[in-house]
Image: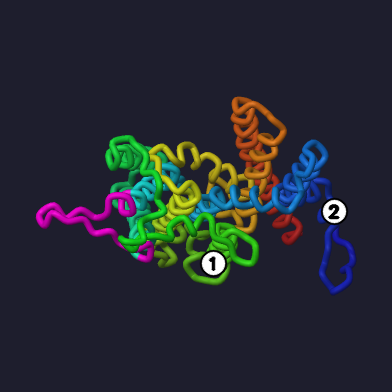
């Protein structure tokens, strides 16, 4: 049954105001709703939770997960997964630590070159991107399932990080002024206009990734592949190349996180980043990105990272046991996936009803 057009001349049906559509809208806004709910809860339960100092510290913690989540967003939108980002974070931190602490050893000449930070950082970023590119090549060229490929890469890269230092930590990464490799700690400790560099980097990276997703053909191709890979291939999209690039981006962003974490700690440890991939995946899914691919927003991913980060820090400030924190995070991940499936079913139902209404 049809009704008269409302203001603006847009035809509206009674179905537009159905409970299903209202519920679907709430599901789409779930990340924002969850953010406000947990902010309100911890504001009541924890004294000084919203003090500026506390907020800055929380957002600084959130930035690490945001780097990983923003990087893996394109991967998940293509219906892929990357379990190696946590290990890549740790390995990239170890590469930075090795170059600062031990330098680049040239055994035949019996010398060691200690590169400046302006060399260390680009090298580490390239290493992260290469790990991602290798994942993409294996997945596309040899038809290996992303889960299996990146699981294997996770073990390989984590083992390589251990081998790089014999399982030990590279401490004191402040460098030596006589060697010209100082300044690494400023990446994690430096501030601009009162905010840590890590926070500025997070928002700049989010803006770049969002621009790529919305404005560039690459972003449209990523969504097309996730929605229907076969149709995307038939339409002329170079599916394999796009997939290689999305995993490269994931590795690159993991390298950024590795640099920031090692800089903040002024040390590198091979076990750094263990299970970080779980928080990143949780942030992406909670932000509305479908694990089935083809749907998701970068804004949602960023808000999802805030939800996971505030939840984690809030539980710590409340004195909740670390074991219970793990349980709660697991519940959040499961609930997020269930809600995602509910949204998919409702959207499918709404699309069917819309087609019937148009054909009537």
The residues colored magenta run 98-118
Instruction: Measure how far apart labels 1 and 2 are at the Cα level.
Output: 36 Å
Relative to 211, does residue 310 appear above or below in the rendering? above
Specify few, some or many for label 1: CA neighbours under 10 Å numbering under 14, 14-19, or 20 or more.
Answer: few
The earlier-in-sequence mark between 1 and 2 is 2
Answer yes or no: is residue 116 visible.
yes
Task: Tell whether 115 sits left or right of 202.
Answer: left
Q: Residue furthest front?
A: 178
Residue 281 image position (x, y, % from top left): 54, 44
Mark 1 or 2, closer to the camera: 1
Res 42 → quadrant? top right
Which residue does the numbered mark 1 point to in the structure image? 208
Residue 152 image position (x, y, % from top left): 34, 38
Q: Residue furthest left?
A: 108
Specify few, some or many for label 2: CA neighbours under 10 Å numbering under 14, 14-19, or 20 or more.
Answer: few
What residue is drawn where x is 29% and y is 52%? Answer: 141
Q: Nearer the viewer, residue 232 or 110?
A: 110
Which residue does the numbered mark 2 point to in the structure image? 17
Residue 327 image position (x, y, % from top left): 62, 28
């Amino acid at each position: 049954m049809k009704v008269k057009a409302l203001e603006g001349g847009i035809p509206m049906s009674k179905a537009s105001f159905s409970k299903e559509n209202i519920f679907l809208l709430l599901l789409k806004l779930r990340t924002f709703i969850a953010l406000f709910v947990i902010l309100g809860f911890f504001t009541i339960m924890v004294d000084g939770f919203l003090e500026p100092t506390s907020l800055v510290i929380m957002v600084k913690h959130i930035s690490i997960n945001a780097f990983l989540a923003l990087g893996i967003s394109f991967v998940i939108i293509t219906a892929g997964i990357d379990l190696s980002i946590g290990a890549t974070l740790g390995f990239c931190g170890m590469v930075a630590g090795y170059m600062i602490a031990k330098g680049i050893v040239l055994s035949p000449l019996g010398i060691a070159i200690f590169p400046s930070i302006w060399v260390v950082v680009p090298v580490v970023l390239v290493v992260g991107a290469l790990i991602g590119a290798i994942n993409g090549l294996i997945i596309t060229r040899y038809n290996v399932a992303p889960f299996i490929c990146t699981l294997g890469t996770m073990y390989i890269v984590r083992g390589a990080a251990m081998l790089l230092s014999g399982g030990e930590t590279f401490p004191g990464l402040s460098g030596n002024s006589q060697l010209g490799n100082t300044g690494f700690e400023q990446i994690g400790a430096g501030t601009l206009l009162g905010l840590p560099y890590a926070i500025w980097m997070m928002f700049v990276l989010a803006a770049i990734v969002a621009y790529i997703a919305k404005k560039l053909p690459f972003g449209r191709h990523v969504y097309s592949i996730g929605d229907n890979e076969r149709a995307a291939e038939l339409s002329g999209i170079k599916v394999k190349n796009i997939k290689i690039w999305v995993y490269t981006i994931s590795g690159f962003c993991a390298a950024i996180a590795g640099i920031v974490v090692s800089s903040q700690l002024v040390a590198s440890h091979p076990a750094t980043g263990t299970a970080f991939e779980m928080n990143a995946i949780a942030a992406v899914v909670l932000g509305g990105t479908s694990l089935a691919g083809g749907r998701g927003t970068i804004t949602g991913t960023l808000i999802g990272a805030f939800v996971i980060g505030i939840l984690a820090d809030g539980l710590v400030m409340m004195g909740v046991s670390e074991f219970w924190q793990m349980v709660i995070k697991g519940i959040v991940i499961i609930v997020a996936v269930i809600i995602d499936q509910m949204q998919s079913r409702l959207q499918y139902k709404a699309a069917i009803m819309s087609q019937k209404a148009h054909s009537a």
